[in-house]
């Protein structure tokens, strides 16, 4: 930081330049106000964090800056010139790049093909070798290794996000918008990314950083803006504020952090899930898990730490019946359920909070009401075997909407129209209201704001207190450490470490996630 300050003092003219200015931006969607008279500035040589709950309007605002949406009112100035951004191409031509939270990739094509898509002079279907070489150089430099020839559909969520980051870095943007890019990185990788962002800022680039992680705001940003209900409610130099103040501004009330919530004690010893030496193939036909064994007991939360692509996805799918086990056994509540159907596994009392909430957790075109009963519509009291009991389903859904604070215009609204946080609340309401004996929670707070995260953590702790066993898969080490009783680390399909959470050191686990054994 001292070197950055000295550098800026020597280049005061550069760092006083406002490269992005948005004045009076208003945007509505079918009567819903996403942004209202928003004023926002970002300067060259600074990292500006944007905070807000899901639905606060921060991504909409940045999508306007990137040309995806056009504002109903307001003006945009880029590098001192008033501009009209009719498409992302207009933004890219002005040096604006964006890493989206929801990926803008073409699954059937390779990493390299996706990265060069839209670049003049590059063949889409057969990228030149120099393109691959440059991509490998950038990925190595920033610690975001990826196979240029891999098909996007074969990649995990975390690996796909790396492609999005690389796509923007490849284009050399000097105004860079990042929408929660660290969600799938290890602490060392996050640290390296932050070094890269600071280096880019030192070079005079403008970095706009959307995140729900307050630690990241305090560690990496120079300035911070908070949006609530579509309006700017707070802007400050980061050094002049703190986590408590930022959380309160985001939500409009005091927030309890994990350290203040408490985790209780694991006291029971009855095994709910037993995984015995299982081996599982990935989508490429290669071993994703190799002789993996562990147990989870009643009233225990077992955290699974690891970087995306090291077998977590395959582990969750094997336990929930979505992927075949090559060898080994999976016992749930004492019963061998290896390679049984998802419905049979669900029927014994297993709930699944999936990693990809839109792809796996819901049916986007169906209503809130229909998604809430997806698991149980075929038996009483939801139906009599032939006809659905809509009166009961409506009352049941309304109760869960109220209990889980799901924001929806009505129960018949298609789920695809709701925010990510509200979609996750629907999944949680459906899965947890069944009083499960085993919960498989895969990245349950991925991309969610601090209030939604607090609510989900509270629900998982409540289920643990009621005796449920919880397998928590997450790349957020703070989440793993604060919720878990024990932690295992997956690396290249093998467990390379196991700790009691109360005795574990976050630095040691972070190194293991990168393959360094203790």
Image (cartoon, rainbow, N blue to C red):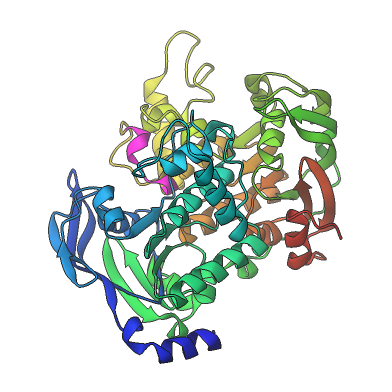
Q: Residue at x 75, y 49 (%)?
A: 302
Q: Above or below — where is 471 with respect to 234? A: above
Q: How far across and how far down the image is residue 312, in percent?
A: 69, 41
Q: Residue 2 in magenta?
A: no
Q: Above or below — where is 390 with respect to 2? A: above
Q: Residue 415 in magenta?
A: yes
Q: Above or below — where is 142 with respect to 463? A: below
Quadrant of the drawing holding the N terminus: bottom right
The answer to which of 115 and 490 lies nearer the viewer is 115
Q: Residue furthest top?
A: 386
Q: How far across and how far down the image is residue 475, in percent?
A: 64, 53
The answer to which of 156 and 365 lies nearer the viewer is 156
The answer to which of 451 and 178 lies nearer the viewer is 178
**Number of marks in the image?**
0
Q: How far across and how far down the image is residue 371, in percent?
A: 44, 29
Q: Residue at x 49, y 53 (%)?
A: 165
Say whether residue 200 is left or right of residue 437. Answer: left
Q: How far across and how far down the image is residue 431, in percent?
A: 56, 36
Q: Is residue 266 visible?
A: yes
Q: Residue furthest left?
A: 73
Magenta stretch bounds: 414-421
Decide whether the magenta segment is chiefly helix, strand or loop.
helix
Say whether residue 13 is left or right of residue 271. Answer: left
């Amino acid at each position: 930081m001292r070197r950055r300050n000295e550098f800026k003092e020597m280049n005061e003219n550069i760092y006083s330049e406002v490269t992005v200015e948005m004045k009076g931006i208003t945007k509505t969607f079918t009567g819903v106000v996403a942004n209202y008279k928003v004023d926002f500035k970002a300067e060259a040589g600074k990292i500006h964090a944007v905070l807000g709950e899901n639905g606060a309007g921060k991504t909409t605002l940045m999508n306007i800056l990137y040309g995806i949406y056009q504002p109903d009112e307001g003006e945009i100035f880029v590098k001192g010139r008033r501009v009209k951004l009719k498409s992302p191409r207009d933004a890219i031509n002005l040096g604006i790049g964006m890493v989206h939270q929801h990926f803008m990739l073409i699954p059937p094509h390779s990493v390299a093909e996706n990265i060069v898509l839209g670049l003049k002079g590059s063949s889409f279907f057969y990228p030149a070798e120099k393109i691959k070489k440059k991509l490998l150089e950038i990925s190595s430099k920033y610690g975001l290794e990826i196979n240029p020839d891999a098909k996007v559909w074969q990649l995990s969520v975390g690996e796909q996000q790396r492609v999005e980051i690389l796509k923007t870095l490849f284009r050399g943007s000097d105004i860079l918008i990042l929408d929660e890019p660290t969600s799938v990185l290890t602490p060392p990788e996050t640290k390296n990314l932050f070094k890269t962002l600071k280096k880019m800022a030192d070079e005079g680039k403008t970095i706009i950083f959307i995140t729900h992680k307050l630690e990241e705001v305090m560690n990496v940003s120079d300035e911070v803006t908070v949006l609530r209900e579509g309006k700017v409610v707070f802007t400050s130099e980061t050094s002049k504020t703190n986590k408590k103040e930022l959380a309160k501004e985001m939500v409009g009330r005091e927030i309890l952090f994990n350290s203040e919530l408490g985790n209780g004690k694991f006291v029971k010893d009855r095994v709910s899930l037993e995984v015995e030496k299982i081996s599982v193939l990935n989508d490429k036909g290669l071993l994703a898990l190799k002789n993996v064994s562990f147990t989870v007991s009643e009233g225990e939360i077992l955290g699974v730490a690891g970087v995306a692509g090291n077998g977590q996805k395959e582990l969750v799918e094997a336990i929930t019946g979505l992927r075949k086990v090559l060898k080994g056994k999976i016992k749930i509540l004492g019963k061998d359920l290896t390679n049984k159907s998802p419905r049979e596994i669900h029927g014994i009392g297993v709930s699944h909070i999936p990693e990809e909430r839109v792809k796996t957790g819901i049916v986007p075109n169906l209503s809130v009401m229909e998604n809430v009963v997806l698991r149980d519509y075929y038996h009483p009291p939801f139906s009599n075997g032939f006809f659905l009991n809509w009166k009961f389903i409506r009352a049941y859904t309304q109760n869960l909407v109220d209990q889980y604070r799901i924001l929806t215009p009505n129960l018949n609204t298609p789920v695809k129209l709701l925010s990510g946080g509200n979609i996750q609340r629907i999944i949680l309401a459906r899965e947890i209201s069944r009083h499960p004996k085993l919960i498989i929670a895969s990245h349950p707070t991925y991309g969610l704001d601090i209030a939604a995260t607090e609510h989900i953590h509270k629900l998982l702790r409540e289920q643990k207190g009621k005796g449920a066993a919880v397998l928590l898969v997450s790349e957020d080490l703070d989440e793993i450490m604060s919720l878990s009783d024990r932690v295992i680390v997956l690396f290249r399909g093998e467990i390379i470490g196991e700790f009691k959470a109360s005795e574990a050191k976050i630095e040691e686990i972070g190194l293991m996630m990168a393959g360094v054994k203790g």
